Image (cartoon, grey):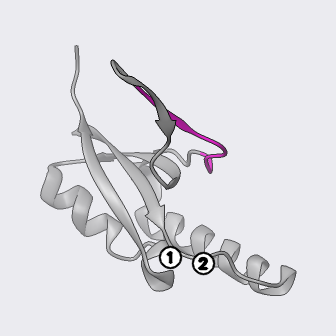
Amino acid sequence: MSKFVYVFTGGTMAPSPEEQEAVMQQWGDWFGTIGSAVLEQGNPFGASATVSATGLTPGAPAGGYTIIDADSLDDATNKAKGCPVLTVGGTVEVYEALSM
């Protein structure tokens, strides 16, 4: 098994508190389908910036992250297919976390 990081990008925020609660339930349900493979549910991201050799620019629009355990990149991407961010126009970037 290897660690993989999901970085959630894009999508839209539910407009009302009731809809936000429903979306949070969808996230909880999705985490339930992944089960013990979820190593860290993660957190949403706030403000960001990108630092480069030439200076500072606004950060890329990422919404948050989750860390999972999976057999392969293919396994990790298959687990991401039910993510609620996909239903609101977002994406899930999947990265293998290499051991150092």
Q: Residue at x 61, y 68 (%)?
A: 28
Magenta residues (range):
43-51
Q: Residue at x 23, y 20 (%)?
A: 99
Q: Of all residues shown, which one is farthest toward the top?
A: 100
Asked whether disc 2 touches disc 1, contact meaning CB atoms under 8 Å apart, the reply is yes
Q: Image quarter for residue 26?
A: bottom right
Image quarter in which the N terminus is found: top left
* Residue nearest the observer in this picture, 16 or 50: 50
Q: Amino acid at mark 2?
A: Gln
Q: Secondary structure at mark 1?
A: helix
* Residue nearest the observer in this picture, 67 or 56: 56
Q: Residue at x 75, y 78 (%)?
A: 20
Image quarter in which the C terminus is found: top left
Q: Image quarter for residue 48?
A: top right
- Callout 2: few (<14), some (14-19), or many (20+) C-alpha neighbours within 10 Å? some
Q: Is residue 87 left or right of residue 5?
A: right
Q: What residue is disc 1 on?
A: 84
How would you classify the magenta stretch by its main secondary structure? Answer: loop
Q: Say if the magenta span includes residue 60.
A: no
Q: Image quarter for residue 83?
A: bottom left
Q: Is residue 67 left or right of residue 2?
A: right
Q: Residue at x 56, y 45 (%)?
A: 42
Q: Position of residue 95 (x, y in %)?
A: 26, 44
Q: Is residue 14 above or below residue 5?
A: below
First in sequence: mark 2 vs mark 1: 2
Q: Position of residue 49 (x, y in %)?
A: 53, 35
Q: Amino acid at mark 1?
A: Pro
Q: Say if the magenta span includes residue 47.
A: yes
Q: Position of residue 10 (x, y in %)?
A: 47, 67
